[in-house]
Amino acid sequence: MALKITNVENGNTPKTEKVRITATKDVNTKGYALVDKTFDQNGKLSNEFRHIYIFPALDIKKGEEIILCTAEGTDEKRKYGNSDSLYQALYWGSDHCIWNADGDQATLIEYAVVNSFKVIPKKK
């Protein structure tokens, strides 16, 4: 996998929640998704893939970082402060927090094949 989660910053508001992802080699992000898993107080899985973020097709260079913010915003390349280093800012578009500090798990998925089936309505 050419992308790696390096940190999840949960917050009190969607604007302060971020997932930091680094490219381990040059990659196009088409075919990647980020999902969450939640667990109950006994550590048992309570919700899998409750939230899913599908990455847009972006070319990311090895070593570049993606910062995915939970809130709404405009996806764009940005500079770190006064540095010439760039990162890709992405926005989930949620008005609710996704990451809880009580054991949520962020999972990055690379999917190559998707199987879908059209549901046909029953005849009356």
Image (cartoon, rainbow, N blue to C red):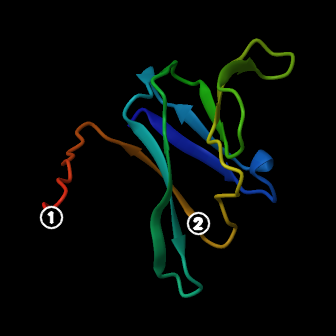
| Residue 53 x/y as whole percent | 51, 44
- How packed mark 2 is, by other alpha carbons closer than 10 Å (few <14, some 14-19, many 20 or more), is some
| Numbered label attached to residue 124 | 1
Q: Is residue 85 above or below residue 116?
A: above
Pointer 2 with pointer 1, Cβ within 8 A: no
| Residue 23 x/y as whole percent | 51, 29
What residue is rendered at 51% in x and 22% in y? 62
Helix, strand or loop for disc 1: loop
Q: Is residue 108 above or below residue 88?
A: below
Q: Quadrant of residue 2?
A: top left
Q: Nearer the viewer, mark 2 or mark 1?
A: 1
CA gap, disc 2 and disc 1:
44 Å
Number of numbered discs: 2
Comparing 27 with 115, the one in front is 115
Location of mark 2 (residue): 104
What residue is rendered at 26% in x and 36% in y? 112
Q: Quadrant of residue 73?
A: top right
> Is 88 placed left or right of 9 in the picture?
left
Q: Outermost residue toward the front?
A: 124
- How packed mark 1 is, by other alpha carbons closer than 10 Å (few <14, some 14-19, many 20 or more), is few
Helix, strand or loop for disc 2: loop
| Residue 7 x/y as whole percent | 64, 48
Q: Is residue 93 above or below residue 61?
A: below
Q: Amino acid at mark 1?
A: Lys
| Residue 3 x/y as whole percent | 47, 35
Where's the N terminus, which quadrant?
top left
Q: Amino acid at mark 2?
A: Asp
